[in-house]
């Protein structure tokens, strides 16, 4: 008869964690990270569950939308209209900083996405792709993938 | 003594998946899907866990707010002010498309909601209702319900 | 040999629920609730999993950003520009109400955050702090913490 401690292993919920690192040469960028998240899911061995992907920085986003260059340019101009970078003095946060606008752009695009994992795959619609949205780049930053399930 | 394989069943995390389909006759609409999500939760038999509901299209939202017609009209006009549909030529995405604005409206309203499941019910505040927000309708589209827990 | 019912306990997914209550004296406020969420996680005993924190009211937000007073003032002015409170008659929702703008501000800032729990701690980036954003205060309101995992 197996000892109780072995039962735990049989039925334990699995969890998997991975960081993705970025160093974007420009202030703003939109990077398709769907392949990296799919690889993480495959590494996790999780078949049914939930997958969280979030920016670990407060001037960046993780969001799901279309992988279409024209749309990303539209997003960039639209976000700049809603929360302009300059003049930097318009924001109280910009004392020794110049990234207040990035904190706002990130709120519109969101910090995180939560996706279903079904039969070992990301359960996404036909055109859903996962993006890291950078609004204050030119330094090392990271996003977190956390998958739980079984 | 039960064989090890039966132990798995006893303690397995449950997961439940269901798609909701929509064909909205107008370009934009706000549809209360709370009853459908409650039905899915009842079907799942899950008592404690998390419930994800997300749009599977990148020009639609799932969000939580008030079921009040005047508010939905206010949302509609406000989103149109922040991300106008016309002139469609103002967006680079609109080459053979006319829905760039829908990709923006959806980012403001959000792709998904994650709700607690407690004692077999959606753990919502008094006025919280779940909506499917359509920003580019007049065709078949869907949302995903995924519930995990036990 | 332990009876089957005891096996369930050994391997059950844990879930933990806690409400946080607020009574903000002003219409709008941004309150750091990170210590309260950390305390809830410690109370839960959960080591690996997901932590959801959501507003239970539709005129409030839970979001993650910087704990910096200047930034909060910037947010406040920016949200007021995107969705002005006055004149209240500009919104159809404001029949016997004056809080339509709060329903909009909350959509930009978001209803909820989902965080990873890793090795018994909130798996946050260096500057990530959790906030309750109030947009229609001066009455009792609450947020929900739900943690699942093991």
Image (cartoon, coloured by chain):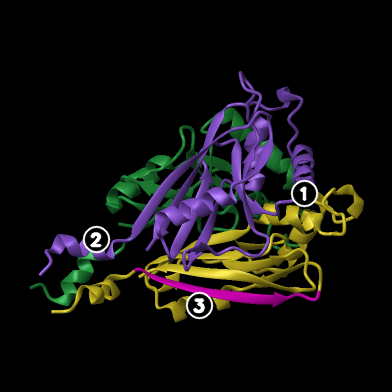
Chain colours: A yellow, B green, C purple
Front residue of this view, candidates A35 and C73: C73
Q: Are marks 2 and 1 on the same chain?
A: yes
Most frequent secondary structure within the magenta stretch: strand
What residue is drawn where x is 54% and y is 58%? B57
Question: Which residue is under mark 1?
Answer: C71
Q: Using the rendered view, name the quadrant where residue C75 is placed.
A: top right
Q: Is residue B113 left or right of residue A89?
A: left
Secondary structure of the residue carrying numbered label 2: helix
The residue wearing badge 3 is A40
Which mark is on residue A14?
none
Label ID, residue C9: 2
Circle nearer the N terminus (2, 1): 2
Nearer the observer, disc 3 or disc 2?
A: 2
The image position of residue B107, as x and y in percent, is 64, 53
- Judge whether residue A49 can be spotted in this image: yes
Chain bearing mark 2: C
- Per the rendered image, the range of residues in magenta is A13-25
- Give the percent coordinates (x, y) of residue B12: 27, 65
Distance in Å between CA atoms under marks 1 and 3? 35 Å
For marks 1 and 3, give the one nearer the viewer: 1
- For label 1, the crowd category at 10 Å Cα-Cα, with few meaning under 14, some 14 to 19 and many 20 or more, is many
Mark 1 — on which chain does it sit?
A: C
Magenta stretch contains residue A51? no
Q: Which residue lies furthest to the left in this view?
A: B1
């Amino acid at each position: 008869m197996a000892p109780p401690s072995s039962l735990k292993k049989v039925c334990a919920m699995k969890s998997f964690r991975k960081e993705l690192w970025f160093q974007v040469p420009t202030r703003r960028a939109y990077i398709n990270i769907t392949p990296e998240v799919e690889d993480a899911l495959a590494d996790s061995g999780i078949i049914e569950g939930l997958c969280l992907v979030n920016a670990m920085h407060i001037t960046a986003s993780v969001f799901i939308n279309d992988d279409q260059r024209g749309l990303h340019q539209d997003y960039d101009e639209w976000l700049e209209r809603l929360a302009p970078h300059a003049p930097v003095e318009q924001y109280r946060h910009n004392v020794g900083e110049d990234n207040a606008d990035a904190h706002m752009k990130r709120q519109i695009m969101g910090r995180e996405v939560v996706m279903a994992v079904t039969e070992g795959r990301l359960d996404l619609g036909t055109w859903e792709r996962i993006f890291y949205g950078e609004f204050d780049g030119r330094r090392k930053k990271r996003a977190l993938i956390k998958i739980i399930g079984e």
